[in-house]
Image (tube, rainbow, N blue to C red):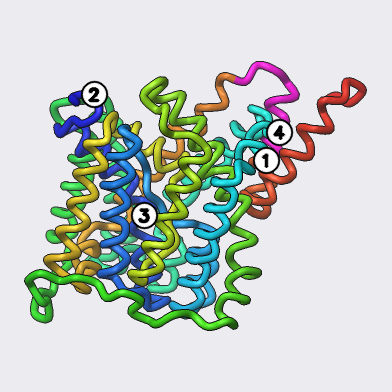
Amino acid sequence: MTERFKFDRMELAGALGDLGTLLPIAIAMVLFNGLDPLGLFMSIGVYYVISGIYFGITVPVQPMKVIGAYAIATAMSPDQILASSFLMALCLLIVGLTGAIDLIRKITPKPVIRGVQLSTGALLISSGVRFIMGTSKYQMLQQAVEPHLGLQSLGVVPISLVIGAVAALMTLLLLNNKKFPAGLIVVAGGFVAGLVLGARLDLSGVDFGFNLPEVLPFGFPGKADFSFALFALVLPQLPMTLGNAVLAYTDLSKEYFGDRSAKVTNRNVCVSMALANFFSFLLGGMPLCHGAGGLAAHYRFGARTSGSNVMIGILFLLLAIFLGSNIIGFFNLLPMSILGVLLVFAGSQLTLTIMDLDQRKDYFIATLILGITLASNLAAGFIAGMITAQLLRWNRLNV
């Protein structure tokens, strides 16, 4: 029991390690797309708890980034986003239950998986640096380096850089400290910094009490919503989900946890994400997945058991039930640059997985995927890597 569930400072610190990926997209999809915050965070909390208990180890819960980024950039309606959740759930269920994902894994070489992990890590680092510099899409749309703070600069230096530098230094000093875990200290310090620097938690309109989400708060999406979601959201997202949230994630889970990750199979992960997205669809939340980047974040900051899942899941559930739709105001206390620091360290952890490659061709495939991902997207990088890996099996081709 103690191996499956630990409830200590390191597990709590690790549980907070992936907030940098989760919160910005979740908050933006509430503010710009009108998703229901109560249903969104309720579905996240439930997914954290149930997936952690089932798999018996630390399990990440993340937004689907292709869908999230495109939906936010184009201010899509909730119906279109919910339609994408339903369709992604259906696709993942079919791919998992038919065993198609096992065939995909069988034909996917190791350097392609490492390339996906490398690219995901690089994207996390890049996103983190933008949060610290105040140049992420969310910050640019809000026209502020720290949209929810009263203070925006110290002289000519953006306040996000100041907070980010202090948080990064604290993280480096405490990264392996079990008495004062880096993730816990940095996130707690971030909330304190938010209050000190002018962030305000407006409790005047909060309906304290027992808040529960509606089922299908926006109604059932129409045919046009499903048609649009299939081509604009689901098809671009699916290769990235299979590459990063299934193949790269299950591989990393086995590297971190060995035999303890026996339940983390490609089929089980597909079915897990399918059920989560059906549930999120019913509550008006966002598309959810697992992911190699999320696992690297939780692991780097100290999570080793499913106790971390139970703690972060219950935290989200209690905040949702207690604060209701005003939960966004609570998370706005945390400066964006703190989330950026978490992303940078999580991304650097994930990029190091390529260190077990030993052939020149393997490194070429991994870095090719990275280059194409940075120029286009991870789905394109994954597909190009698969094709290149098959071509390089021919001995007459060399790099």
Q: Which residue is mark 1?
A: 369
Residue in the picture at 37% in, 60% down:
24
Percent across and percent down for residue 35 are 37, 74
Magenta stretch mostly in which secondary structure?
helix
**Of the numbered discs in the image, which one, if any, rests on residue 107?**
4
**Of the numbered discs in the image, which one, if any, rests on residue 22?**
3
Query: Is 372 rendered above or below residue 34?
Result: above
Q: Which quarter of the figure has residue 299?
A: top left
Percent across and percent down for residue 181 are 20, 32
Q: Which quarter of the figure has residue 10?
A: top left
How far apart marks 2 and 3 lie (CA) works out to 26 Å
* Contact flag, marks 2 and 3 (Cβ < 8 Å): no
Farthest-out residue, top:
358
**Of the numbered discs in the image, which one, if any, rests on residue 3?**
2
Label 4 vs 3, first from the N-terminus: 3
Q: Nearer the viewer, residue 321 or 299?
A: 321
